[in-house]
Image (cartoon, rainbow, N blue to C red):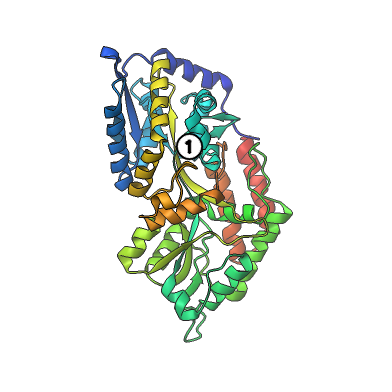
């Protein structure tokens, strides 16, 4: 089951934060409610987010939001101490894997009332909404959400006469055909696929493969199910395929895979929208396609960030932040956000055609339907993912998938019970 901090501790922190929400926070002088908004977007996405906040401020005279940009690591390290010291933000951007920890400590406020009363919430991508759920309560409003996707080198595909794969068997066949070992030394000059087996992109490669194979890692109820017949079959399928076809190096991290693709040494890899920029800077002609379907279809773990309202916010400040949510999700603002940030739209009102001027965003918009939350509501997600990494890396190095998943099951159960 899910690991939670003692209720008494969470309650104490929540009371401490709520009891001082009016002290050391932005004022409501002159009828204007002022909010601090911390986020970690430091590139083009940060610029457009700040611009949108400024447009929201100009659009009405009741709420003023001041964004503060901090590197993600700094934001996550400093937010809880700042909130405890009454110097934190009322609104913050937060990766979903951190939401269960913050929520369990009473640092975030549930958003269920907004979800249930505001029509803006009705058009949000359900998978994106799921990323902020902890114990049945919604603590996050989506800010960015993009499913893991496949980038492929179009020149390599054309040279080999290979079609873009749509199923696992086609994927393995394409990867094998695209692998080139000209001198026969067992070390290909060109690999067909960079199949990451540890520290994968967004930690999502293997959860995606397991779910596409009909399995899972941890259920939404907090039950560990990594040791299942479906997962054993999936891990065996891929470890056997790599051992036989030798179409991917083993021991790859997400960063390793990015490097191989940008260097023109691999035909296919899995990643997110940043690979478009990396490819263009490296002179790589690329295409974007959904993950090929497994036995249970396509499920792609999503890279995501949510907006959360902290316990430091008063009732009036919470309402003001929710007013920003409603404004942010308007269609024209969603189009602006997606086109400038590179993140696909968060609402069903925005179609691929609406963002067609950015081919990457348009392609990702069509794939949003496949997105799934990584480990929603799981507090010790780092421990769970470490156990998963160990199993997948050892399996692709020749270990027994069944035995490795049994061990991973035990390690994950211990982490969640701890």
What residue is shown at x 68% (from left), y 53% (from top)? 214
Between 324 and 281, the residue placed more toward the observer is 324
The picture places residue 281, in percent across and down from the top left corner, at 30, 64
For residue 69, which quarter of the picture?
A: top left
What residue is shown at x 65% (from left), y 49% (from top)? 216
The picture places residue 386, in percent across and down from the top left corner, at 55, 49
Q: Above or below — where is 83 with respect to 132? A: above
- Asked whether residue 246 appears in the rendered view, the answer is no
- Asked whether residue 298 appears in the rendered view, the answer is yes
Residue farthest toward the front in the current orientation of the protein: 353
**In the visual, does 239 lie left or right of 311?**
right
What residue is shown at x 29% (from left), y 28% (from top)? 59
Numbered-mark total? 1
Q: Above or below — where is 32 with respect to 46? A: above
**Are there few (<14), some (14-19), or many (20+) residues within 10 Å of tag 1?**
some
Q: Which residue is mark 1?
A: 98
Where's the N terminus, which quadrant? Answer: top right
Between 80 and 273, the residue placed more toward the observer is 273
């Amino acid at each position: 089951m899910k690991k939670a901090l003692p209720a008494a501790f969470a309650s104490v922190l929540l009371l401490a934060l709520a009891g001082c929400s009016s002290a050391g926070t932005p004022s409501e002088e002159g009828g204007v409610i002022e909010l601090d908004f911390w986020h970690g977007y430091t590139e083009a996405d940060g610029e457009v987010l700040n611009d949108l906040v400024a447009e929201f401020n100009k659009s009405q005279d009741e709420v003023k939001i001041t964004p503060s940009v901090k590197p993600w690591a700094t934001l996550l390290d400093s937010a809880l101490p700042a909130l405890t010291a009454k110097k934190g933000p009322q609104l913050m951007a937060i990766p979903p894997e951190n939401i269960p920890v913050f929520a369990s400590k009473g640092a975030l406020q549930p958003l269920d009332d907004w979800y249930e009363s505001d029509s803006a919430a009705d058009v949000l991508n359900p998978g994106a909404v799921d990323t902020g759920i902890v114990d049945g309560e919604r603590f996050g409003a989506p800010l960015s959400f993009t499913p893991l996707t496949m980038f492929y080198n179009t020149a390599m595909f054309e040279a080999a006469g290979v079609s873009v794969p749509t199923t696992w068997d086609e994927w393995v066949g394409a990867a094998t055909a695209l692998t080139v070992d000209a001198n026969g030394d067992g070390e290909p000059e060109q690999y067909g696929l960079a199949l990451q087996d540890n520290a994968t992109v967004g930690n999502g490669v293997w959860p995606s493969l397991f779910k596409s194979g009909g399995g899972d890692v941890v259920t939404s109820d907090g039950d560990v199910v990594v040791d299942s017949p479906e997962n054993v079959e999936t891990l065996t399928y891929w470890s056997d395929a790599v051992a036989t076809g030798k179409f991917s190096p083993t021991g790859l991290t997400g960063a390793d895979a990015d490097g191989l693709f940008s260097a023109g040494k691999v035909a296919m890899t899995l990643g997110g929208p940043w690979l478009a920029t990396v490819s263009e800077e490296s002179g790589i002609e690329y295409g974007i396609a959904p993950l090929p379907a497994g036995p249970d279809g396509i499920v792609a773990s999503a890279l995501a960030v949510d907006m959360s309202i902290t316990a430091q916010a008063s009732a009036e400040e919470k309402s003001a932040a929710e007013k920003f949510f409603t404004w942010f999700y308007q269609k024209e603002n969603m189009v602006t956000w997606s086109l400038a940030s590179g993140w696909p739209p968060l609402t069903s009102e925005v179609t691929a055609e609406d963002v067609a001027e950015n081919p990457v965003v348009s392609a990702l918009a069509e794939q949003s339907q496949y997105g799934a939350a990584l480990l929603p509501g799981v507090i010790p997600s780092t421990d769970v993912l470490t156990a998963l990494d160990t199993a997948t890396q050892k399996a692709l190095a020749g270990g027994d998938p069944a035995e490795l998943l049994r061990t991973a099951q035990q390690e994950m159960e211990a982490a969640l019970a701890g």
